[in-house]
Image (cartoon, rainbow, N blue to C red):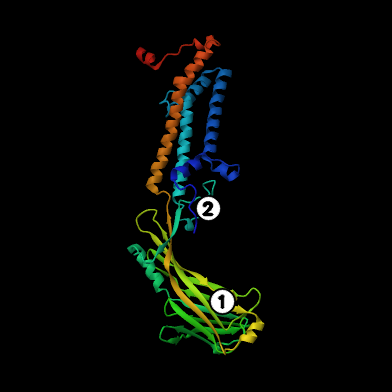
Amino acid sequence: YPRSPDLNVYEDVLLHHMFSIDSTGHCISVSPIFWTVMLMVVLLVFFIGVGFLRLCVTSYQHDRLFLTVKMIFERTDLIGEGELWIGGLVSLAIILTTAMAYAFANSYLNQYPSESVGPSNFACDTTIRNAQFATNLQALAVPISSDQQTIFDLLNQQNFTLYLQFINTAASCASLTISQVTDSATVSLRFLSCSHVNGTLLARVLLPEHDIKITATLSEVQVVGGIMVGLDGPSAETEFCSLKELNFRQSFYSPSAETLAQAATISMGLTKAINETGPLSGSDSVFEGIWYPTFTYSLSQMFISADTYTMTANLTSTTITINIAETSYYIKNDQSPIAKQAEIVIRTLLFACLCLEMCSTTFVICKLLLIPIYKRISAPLCPKFMNIVEPTHEMASAHH
């Protein structure tokens, strides 16, 4: 089951995307900070170019063009409230940053659930998903919630088909018997299919229940090189629950090419694995379930050498005992969105306001602290430029 990402808070994800840049072409092309800087450079070069044109070529049209461009920047000044042309430049950069932030937010919101979406080409990290994960073991003795009852019922009602394969043997279907062993009787199970092809004996039987003890007996003395055990089960679906098809195999053989003993035991533990996918909107979760098998066995007891088999083979049959039982716990995997729509909209808006406030604070600091210090230092050095008096807005309005 996937691990949760390191950044599982939307604010961290947004800040990392907005202010990170990498050397790859894809990362540069989707980096908001890159396009913001490019916009500011282009606008600044344009404004400076118009200013130089005004200084180099004096004419009424050039003066009017310069004043018009300056007025446009001042009218877009959200930071200094229309006082500074540089504030309009920064304001346009903030508008671009906000637009790219909301474009990222919209794409990021739809990256859920993780198994149903493609790569995140809108971000530098194409594996980013709006999903976080958690997994744990829970005891079956603890009562389950009503919304999980359906997937539990589907798992409990799934029909199992036992798959049993004897490898590298001359035994035939006529010599094979598969039975269910209970405390009071041994019941023979009917084959769904049985075949013997190229030294491989393959049989399938339908199991009457999940917790069961099975014996597979070869009535003739034949050498067996290995066996394969598996379970099959059909899939099923309801409105919010999906039971996955069961289809697994486990082979048992000796790495040193030994022979299967005349008596061998395999224990198979079945554990319910349930995935719960929380809703992106609404309140209904989606559940998926499958059985997860684990095996307990001893190869040293299951397989013996050919010489040992010849000396100890005193039985007229080979019997494989398979104990199938459900474990006392189940695996619960949870997937939920890192952020839903309302949170993403509000958090992104707060990010835009934060950018605006940071720029406003910077401008206030420059206006009230840095510029006066600069004037005080440069006044003795350049008195001719410092004696220029510009009328304030209050003086201009008083004349009107």
| Neighbourhood count class around disc 1 (C-alpha, 10 Å): few under 14, some 14–19, many 20 upward | some
Mark closer to the chain start, 2 or 1: 2
**Position above or below: 143 against 92:** below
Residue depicted at x 54% and y 46%: 124
Residue type for callout 2: Pro
Report the side of 333 relative to 260 (left or right).
Answer: left
**Position above or below: 289 against 259:** above
Q: Which residue is mark 1?
A: 228
Q: Which residue is mark 2?
A: 119
Give percent across and percent down for residue 152. Answer: 38, 68
Give percent across and percent down for residue 355. Answer: 45, 34
Residue depicted at x 41% and y 45%: 344
Report the side of 100 relative to 23 (left or right).
Answer: left
Give percent across and percent down for residue 23. Answer: 60, 42
Residue type for callout 1: Met
Whether residue 206 can be seen here: no
Secondary element at image label 1? strand
Question: Depth check: 26 or 247 in front?
Answer: 247
Residue depicted at x 52% and y 14%: 377
Q: CA distance from mark 2 to mark 1?
A: 38 Å
